[in-house]
Amino acid sequence: MARRRTQKGADAGRQGTPRTAAAGGAVAVTGTGRHFRAHRRATLWMKITAVAVAVVMVGVVSVAGILVMRLQNNVQVAELNLGPGASTAAAADNNKDDLQILILGTDTRDGANGGYGTTADATGYGHSDVMMLMNISKGNREVSVVSFPRDLMVPIPACKDPKTGEQYPAQELGQLNSALSQGGPGCTVAAINQLTGLNIDHFMLADFTAVKDLSNVIGGVEVCVDHSVNDVNGSGLVLPAGKSLVQGEQALAFLRTRHSFGDASDIARIQAQQYFLGSMIRKIKSDGTLSDLPKVYNIADAITKNLTIDSGLANIPSMVAIANRLKNIDLTKVAFVTAPWVPFPADENRNILSQPAASDLFTALRKGTDLTGGSSPSTSAPPAQPTTAPATAAAPVPAYDKTIQPVTVVNASGAADRNTELLAALTAAGYTDLGQSTAATAAATTISYGNGFQDVATDVAALFRIPASALVASPGVSGVRLNAGSDFASGTAYGQSALPPDIVASTADQSGKCLTVNPDMYPQD
């Protein structure tokens, strides 16, 4: 017992700083103290915790990887541009550059869409009954959404179907929504590039099922009509007068109905589609959806199951980058526009672009002009301030007969039908011996003149306010040749461009409006 008490006392004396005598009187620390043993236990727990954290991190990364793979495996990928001589320019930076995204809705009845008709209605790629060009400005100051009528008659470029290898010849004039059937969305991209002089960066092609799924995942979209709708023999849309929340089949029916709104035209349907999209944007923005990654994922998962996109968009960083750019956009700067049109003379059920309004719009898009008013300082060049030739009004009466002076207008602007506006201005000024042609796009406008025609060239330059430095003596030219480059793609005053009046149909902030129901189909009570 004594030894036991003595041992206990000795142990107690060693508890704070356990030591043993070493040679030379030095004190060496042993490994038997109470504090040391506690440190070993802490180290063990730290190791266990570190392992646990590592396991959780691996789990999170694995789940994230699975989600990313799922999204990327959902989508189908197609070539961006099927047109001949497709642009080889460097791809736009999805995070910061001006960005053009063509949004297409196909009427194909293939696959899951078979319930909306027979394959005889639209097989394969189908037709693009929705064509909206979304432009996101550099600096994210504004967004424009330009709708193209499905019945618009335009030049269709030659396209090759990358799946079958089938070649489709160019058409001098074809219905724009038929371009999709000629090899896929890349042919529609090529046609609209050719039409507008733009270089579209991405496309999204959605089918009927994608529209239903998207409307469901965001909890529906609010719409309002000024009269009850019962389109049971058409799209199936049934709505009471006033406000309704539509999703799933009803949302799709709202977008598909052909005769229920306005004058029952395709243009009235475009207005309904823009109305629906504006309401959906307000819903998503008010819910903070684009700042909520789980919600963004759910939306992406819903729509990518029935989506075809280009390879530059077929990755999660690109999708997230675009969502980030859109989440803080001022809704007053989200403009909805329809490409200016007039009835096609050969068939009143078809349309053609209205000039010069269409060229003015496309020029504004290329320059990054804010369609709601003003210009984007980051992208728009300042108005040209050149030294022009003397004004015609201040000059003496010309010593020549304008009616016999040969003047040729060459469209090298990249804008479709550019010559019409310029020839009209020359005719109004008294020139009648006029010719026209089209050439490859040139950056700068020039006026070439042959021997003895310098005075005529000077007056033509003054008419269009083209700087005198653009005049070029060319002995091989017969008369005067105005070569209108991409810097003079619209209007009749060089260095200036004006938007068509009332070009913006609506902006995304405009809530509380009710669509007008077609009075011929639904007589007012």
Image (spheres, rainbow, N blue to C red):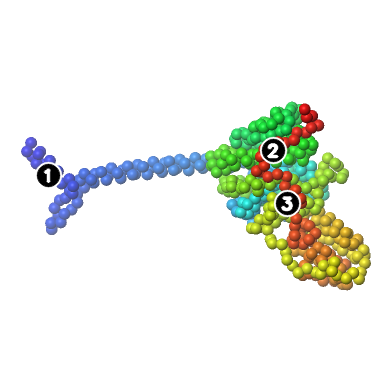
Disc 1 and disc 2: Cα gap in Å? 92 Å
Q: Return the x and y of residue 500 as percentages of the image width and height.
A: 76, 51
Which residue: 82% across, 42% down?
350
Q: Which residue in the structure is indicated by mark 3?
A: 193
Give, as a three-letter code, the residue at label 3: Asn
Q: Residues within 10 Å of mark 3 (few under 14, many from 20)?
A: some
* Element carrying mark 3: helix
Which residue: 66% across, 56% down?
376
Mark nearer the viewer, 3 or 2: 2
Please tell me in which quadrant of the rendered image residue 115 appears: top right
Q: Is residue 482 above or below residue 62?
A: below
Query: Label 2 near label 1: C-beta < 8 Å?
Result: no
Identify the residue at the far left of this view.
Answer: 2
Disc 3 and disc 2: Cα gap in Å? 34 Å
Q: Is residue 39 left or right of residue 98?
A: left
In front: 217, or 502? Answer: 502
Disc 1 and disc 3: Cα gap in Å? 94 Å
Q: Return the x and y of residue 413 as percentages of the image width and height.
A: 77, 58
Which residue: 77% across, 27% down?
525
Give, as a three-letter code, the residue at label 2: Lys
In front: 466, or 414? Answer: 466
Q: Which residue in the structure is indicated by mark 1?
A: 10
Mark nearer the viewer, 1 or 2: 2
Give, as a three-letter code, the residue at label 1: Ala
Q: In the rendered structure, find residue 513 and report the number of the disc placed on it.
A: 2
* Element carrying mark 2: loop
